[in-house]
Image: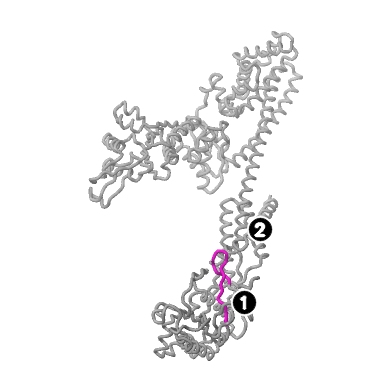
Amino acid sequence: MRRRRALTAAILGLAATLLVAAAVIAGGPAVVAVEWTIQDRWARPAAPASPTLVVITRDPAGEARFGAGPWDRAVLARVIGALSRAGATAIGVDLALGGSSAPGRGGAASDALLGQATREAGNVVVTAVPGQPLPPLARHARAAGHTLAPADPDGVVRRVPLLIRSDPEALPAFGLALADVQTGAPSSFTVDRQGRTLVAWAAPRSLHVVPFLDVWTALEERRADALRSVVENKIVMILAEPARAPARTPAGAMPEAMIQAHLLNAALGGAWLGEAPLGWAVAAALVLSVLAAWLVLALRWWTAALALGVLVAAAGVALRLTPALTGILLPALLPLGAMALATAGAAAGSQLGARHRLRHLEGEVAGIREVLIRRESTVEALEEDLEAARDRLGAAEALRRELTEAQAQEQQTRARLETLERELRAADRREGALDDAEQERLRRQCADLGIVTREPAMLALFRDLARAARSSLPVLVSGQPGTGKELFARAAHRLSPRAAGPFVAVNTAAVPPELFESELLGHVKGSFTGAVADRKGYFEQADRGTIFLDEIGDLRADQQGKLLRVLQEKSFYRVGATRPTAVDVRVVAASNRDLERGVAEGWFREDLYFRLKGLVLRLPPLSARRQDIAPLAARFLDEAAAEAGRRVALSEAAVLALERQPWPGNVRELQNCLRRAVALSDRPVLTPDDLGLVPAAAPRAEADGDAGVLAALRRHAFDMQATARALGWDRSTVTQRLKGLGFRALVDAAGDRGKAALTLAGDPALARTVELKLGEYHEHLLRAVAGFDSAEAAVAACRRRFKNLPERHFHSLEILVRQELQRRA
């Protein structure tokens, strides 16, 4: 079993990995963009301990001083010179240098001053446009670089091309050119096939942003020391161009020059990021998906869920820490997607395997049941043969040995059947589908709403409720406590067009009489002592929904009058209010008292009764719903076992004991019985002794007459031994009763065994079992008359052979004997 699970997990993991890898490869750039969108939340390399880059930006105050358009280049020349003297190791200027300055902005004189300042500084890097020749002013700079930052398919910039072909030589990225000027040596970095590198977005403390006007003010006030403290031994980048449309980045919207600042910061700190090879990703995905599938297949569902959570958390920690520790971004979609797909496949496979094993087990049980029926019939026939041959000593001993062997085989078969039935109940506690398609549809719909029933009467009530729920017709549910009145009320709400509205349940018997009007209708602030604020009553809380008035038969006469007025007017006054409040409410009422009797006796208002009596549902007690006891017991047992944290099953004898109980407390009493049994018993399979039931009297009254015997046989699925134990008889007596009933049914059905079996079974599901027994009885009768030609002699022999048959059934036996002799003649 372990090898099979491991092999299945390996196959599922491999298939999931290949499928997700194919999807990632086929997705192309769009999938990669999503991949890095996930990674951007984790890939945050540590920033340098102190700022190494100073960015001087245009600010509103500077534009108010120097204008909103291009500035006078003489101003930039003065700033460049001051920064050089203050000790800046490299100066980057983001400025469009093409063409000459306008006369209003300094003209040729300003251009000359900028060129002179650039040449004297000797460490200035300017921006250039790829594919275009450098302007004259840029030739005085130490280097030039581009600011291109193309976005990924999702519109987010994550990579920057480090070198772009341009005449007469390749043009580096602006940030990379500044790094080379500062360090004097080329940087080591990782690029993809398109020559682009992933940008490691810096934390805010690694960049020092200074407004341009602050620098200019320091120059005018001759505060050289203050300027030196800011830029000495640092790279300075001047963003002098007017604001352009910012680009979207994982760190927020920013200009292209600011993207170059982040690239420069990564180059200075050596915080380059690389992508993990595809082979690593596939290997990691394969390991994780195989492990996830194995966890689902090998562990229980709650243990597997916990282990999968730990596995996903570990993968998340690895994805988060690896970029900071190694500089390599691990893919997220491939391993996580493969894990999810393998987990889903393992769960689906586990369910399908369980269903296949369950069907196989059911088929084996059915086959063994048929063998048991044949063995049982053989034993019964041999018992009769032994009784008929007691006068012949030689034959009696042989028959006794044959009977002993048959009994041993029967006991072996019965033990095997009981074992398989216990396994079947442990594998699946659900009830099988009903034979009638409409009844099965109603049963499933009831189950979806929490109502467990297989009784045709309950299903008919639910069908009426489902039809009436679509209208605003009031519903009145009556029945003993614990029969499910509130479940039907909630079902009426969920099946109605008001299902999206509130459902307000009110136990009217628990509302104090003096607070009745305040609780149902609400009150306003100050209307009475203690009314410190306005309060909505239950009717107003249920507006556009459903209100459930439970135990309505316990209302006093004055309370009934107040409730009637609300139902008639569909509006009311809060206690202390001067304006009415209108509501739109569907009313569902319930009572365990007979309201019709209350109307006749005068303790319940007739007009209120007819106002509530739209659809009346009278729920039967559990004692009248014997088919529901087993599925209800299974439901309550599962809930109690889940609370206790262990697995518990019911033995067949325990189920039979539950079905024999009267249950005056209805469903609640059954639920408490099972919860008590699970709490007090340590055994995995509960027996009747664990249930603590008061022994029911033997149903001898029911057994009086053929109808009682037939009812007992039907209740125990025509198991002769179980029926005899329930009736307090020996099995041979029950056999003789069934044999007589079978002979009479064969006569009524004109020899048609299938029709006779269905008549006795009363349930198509039991017809096959009864047909096998009738076949054995009929064949035994035919063998008994095989050597006779006279009807009188054959009947006399059968009377001796079937002497334990009830006298009232010998007439049917004589008819069958005469029909057989006529057929042979």
Between 53 and 103, which is closer to the camera in this rendering?
A: 103
Q: Residues within 10 Å of mark 2 (few under 14, many from 20)?
A: few
Which residue corresponds to mark 2? 22
Which residue corresponds to mark 1? 163
- Residue 52 in view of the camera: no
* Quadrant assignment, res 148: bottom right
Between 377 and 586, which is closer to the camera in this rendering?
A: 586
Q: CA distance from mark 2 to mark 1?
A: 32 Å
For numbered disc 2, what is the local secondary structure?
A: helix
Between 800 and 237, which is closer to the camera in this rendering?
A: 237
Of the two numbered discs 2 and 1 on the same chain, state the one appearing first in sequence.
Answer: 2
* Quadrant assignment, res 387: top right
Q: Position of residue 3 (x, y in %)?
A: 70, 52
Mark 1: amino acid: Leu
Mark 2: amino acid: Ala
- What's the magenta region? 144-159
Residue sitting at 59 percent across and 25 percent down? 761
